[in-house]
Amino acid sequence: MGAAALGALPWALLLLLGPLLPGQGLQANITRVSEENTGGITAAPPATAQEVHPLNKQRHNHSTDGHSKPRKAFPVLGIDYSHVRIPFEISLWILLACLMKMGFHVMSSVSKVVPESCLLIVVGLLVGGLIKAVGEKPPILKSDIFFLFLLPPIILDAGYFLPLRQFTENLGTILIFAVVGTLWNAFFLGGLMYAVCQIGGSGLNHIGLLANLLFGSIISAVDPVAVLAVFEEIHINELLHILVFGESLLNDAVTVVLYHLFEEFAYFEQVTIIDIILGFLSFFAVSLGGVFVGVIYGLIAAFTSRFTSNIRVIEPLFVFLYSYMAYLSAELFHLSGIMALIASGVVMRPYVEANISHKSHTTIKYFLKMWSSVSETLIFIFLGVSTVAGQHYWNWTFVISTLLFCLIARVLGVLVLTWFINKFRIVKLTPKDQFIIAYGGLRGAIAFSLCYLLDYEHFNMRDMFLTAIITVIFFTVFVQGMTI
Amino acid sequence: MGAAALGALPWALLLLLGPLLPGQGLQANITRVSEENTGGITAAPPATAQEVHPLNKQRHNHSTDGHSKPRKAFPVLGIDYSHVRIPFEISLWILLACLMKMGFHVMSSVSKVVPESCLLIVVGLLVGGLIKAVGEKPPILKSDIFFLFLLPPIILDAGYFLPLRQFTENLGTILIFAVVGTLWNAFFLGGLMYAVCQIGGSGLNHIGLLANLLFGSIISAVDPVAVLAVFEEIHINELLHILVFGESLLNDAVTVVLYHLFEEFAYFEQVTIIDIILGFLSFFAVSLGGVFVGVIYGLIAAFTSRFTSNIRVIEPLFVFLYSYMAYLSAELFHLSGIMALIASGVVMRPYVEANISHKSHTTIKYFLKMWSSVSETLIFIFLGVSTVAGQHYWNWTFVISTLLFCLIARVLGVLVLTWFINKFRIVKLTPKDQFIIAYGGLRGAIAFSLCYLLDYEHFNMRDMFLTAIITVIFFTVFVQGMTI
């Protein structure tokens, strides 16, 4: 209970400060308030002490409005919020995330039944509603912020501490699920949704095949953040964990390529067979290119760590920096940033661990765990807030068929693919395993952010897509996450 | 040698990418290049394969300029630098800082003679020159970035690990140096500089008393960053270290008040005695207010750490967050952020350490050390870069008298104050101690940033002030730092 009361504190502070923040351009316009205004040499009579209430700029301005060049005494206390606004608000959001996470662990009775990710989305919904209630516009999870700042720590944490032996042993299975499975999902869903849109009376006839395939490619990928959040809580066996989680990492290249492919094609007048071949080629460019960028940075990091024996204190920073730059460099060329991050983590880890001090290793480990955990928390909270903040366009046909076909595509895909995979595996996947793989195909913030990135000018059905995607995310995280 | 070669790498990369960055608004205008352009159905004839050179947007644009709506194939490789620009460039700067720091430790023969801070300034000068040589504008150390992002980690590291016993035992001495000493320096220097400006033929008659006092208050404060950097390398005895370093921390309140006081007074037509009394009051408001804010956040942090036993992973974040918010909250009200940070660190530390896990403690310690060390490195590099980048106005009279009076004021102040202090101290300060205290009064980036904050419209002598301040900083860091 104490923690919950504590959680309200920063918000009370923010609400208290709310009236003081008229916007961006306050910088030069420092509010000048004094404890007592005195008669100087100027012509204007001084404002009386009662009129000048500290922290009340409105009244202060009013009291001097009538005079030219009001005489002000030296301000004993000034306020300048615009100066500290950005870091202060970011700190507040992170603090909220930490306090919520802490609160759920204190009230363990609730968090045993409901997964944390669900609780966090609910918190986001409440906070968004609260911000809306006081007349402000709640922030939407910006795609740039998500891809540049929130996603990398989670992927780096996962990639750096990837159980490499299990991962490589099951690489074939993982790749088939990630590549063939995602392709299947995208085209099956996109095609069926196109068929639904063509049905007369649905009012969706204007959504063409390419837009539907784009939608399918956005929503078909299993989300690593959601999978990590739910699977870490339910302590599933390691094989299934690495299968589903590995799939969620490696399907990134497929998603990136399909997304850019269909987005570009939507601008074309006609798609030629050459375009399709180029798209096919770009799948290899995106995935292998991403891995290549990651390996390069991983090797540089490994090489650098040989020279840090005299300056242990900055060793962790090299790991973070090189990994992050691998991710950014890959993103720069529209390669798979996730695969670059995983590759750099996997390549650098054995060398770096042999070279750096034990304390540095602890710092890397705990800092990564801390940062990824906070990122994850922020992502789920912002999913909730964005749901309240965003423009929604609800279409029953579209949403229900999306949800239905998502489930069918996933189940069919897993059944057919495991039937094929089991011919080659020594340890066969049991029907129970197949059920969990199919059921664990959670969708998350990556889909939301990718859809949000779409240009509204060209994709005027974006709001309906977003609504459907949020519904699917909520369904998979709440219903599947809670019952798994 | 290997490290030096490695250091050149990110810069080579940046220079390579240079021509690709035409500015901010590239986002939507993704460069589309294809391996082979194909004859589609469109009317425009395709560009030949030779003309479309990847990474060469200029030529590509040229080749299609003459045609309406050029037909483009699906881009196998795209480039979108604006999307990743900000985090990428920040990472590059931090990487440069880390590599330089590492390089100096590898080439230990050089760093034994010259303090690291000097080497870093030289690196900054070189990098700035290089950026200028390729025709770009080198970045200037923005005051906002300095005060909001670079300074807090250094102060928090210092405040959290402050040797409390020694600090409190010598608090009286430290306070006298910090308050009386800084006031003496500011007024002595400001007054004498005003006298110099009044001498006929100096061409400085337009600089009034208030502007000179403002200049004196900016340049008179000993800088904690410079003191930490130099004193940590020379391993001086603990008493002298805490005396000079403590002074550099506690003089912040005096500097903040004097700075705002003289800055405000410069806008006034006439300064009344009441204004001066208010200024005197605001010294207590700024210092005690800062401590109060820090204590509040420190207590909240201590209280919060009681509930983290189930979620060890985010414990370090609470320490960073609450301290940072203490700093920002103090800055918000123009209180002393440095004193808030020190106070919050001192208050929370015993409670937090008793509550959190050993691993979290290690993470906090090493992360703070890492971050403060990188911040310090960046500050010195940027001081060098800013020197190359800034507008300079060199006036021999002004610069030489500033340097001279700075030294005289410091020596006189220390001599008189220690004579007074020694009457009350059990462990007297020897003449050798006095020499080191006087000689250790290094100036640094805080003075530079405060001066840079001045409004050029109102203080048209700002460039001359900046030039003089940079000269004093270089003199104290190079000459005093190298010979101490």
Image (cartoon, coloured by chain):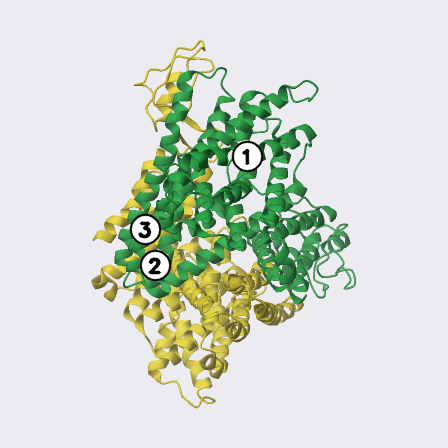
Chain colours: A green, B yellow
If you read the primary sequence from the N terminus, does the residue marked by circle 1 or circle 2 appear first? 1
The relative height of residue B477 versus residue B392 in the rendered view (above or below) is below
Give the mark, 3 or 1, whose residue is nearer the N terminus: 1
For label 1, the crowd category at 10 Å Cα-Cα, with few meaning under 14, some 14 to 19 and many 20 or more, is many
| Crowd around label 2: few <14 · some 14–19 · many ≥20 (10 Å) | many
**How far is the residue under mark 1 from the one under mark 2?**
39 Å
Give the residue displayed 78% in from the left and 60% down from the top. A51
Residue A199 point in image, percent of width and height: 65, 19
Please give left or right for residue A460 compared with residue A231 in the image. Answer: right
Between circles 3 and 1, the one closer to the viewer is 1
Are both tags, 3 and 1, on one chain?
yes
Query: Is A20 drawn above or below residue B81 in the view shown?
Result: below
> Can you identify the residue that label 3 sits on?
A348
Tell me whether marks 2 and 3 sit on the same chain. Answer: yes
Q: Which residue is mark 2?
A: A315
**Which element carries disc 2, helix, strand or loop?**
helix
Gap in angstroms between the C-alphas marked 3 and 1: 32 Å
Which corner quadrant of the image does residue B476 belong to? bottom left
The kind of residue tagged 3 is Met
Quadrant where the N terminus of chain A lies? bottom right
Residue designated by label 1: A219
Q: B299 or B474: nearer the eye?
A: B299
| Element at label 3 | helix
Q: Is residue A355 above or below residue A298?
A: below
**Closer to the observer: label 1 or label 2?**
1
Chain containing the residue with disc 3: A
Comparing B246 with A414, the one in front is A414
Q: Amino acid at mark 1?
A: Ile
Please provide percent x and percent y for residue B144: 51, 53
Q: Are marks 3 and 1 in contact (CB under 8 Å)?
A: no
Q: In the figure, is residue B6 to the left or right of A217? A: left
Label 1 with label 2: CB-CB less than 8 Å: no
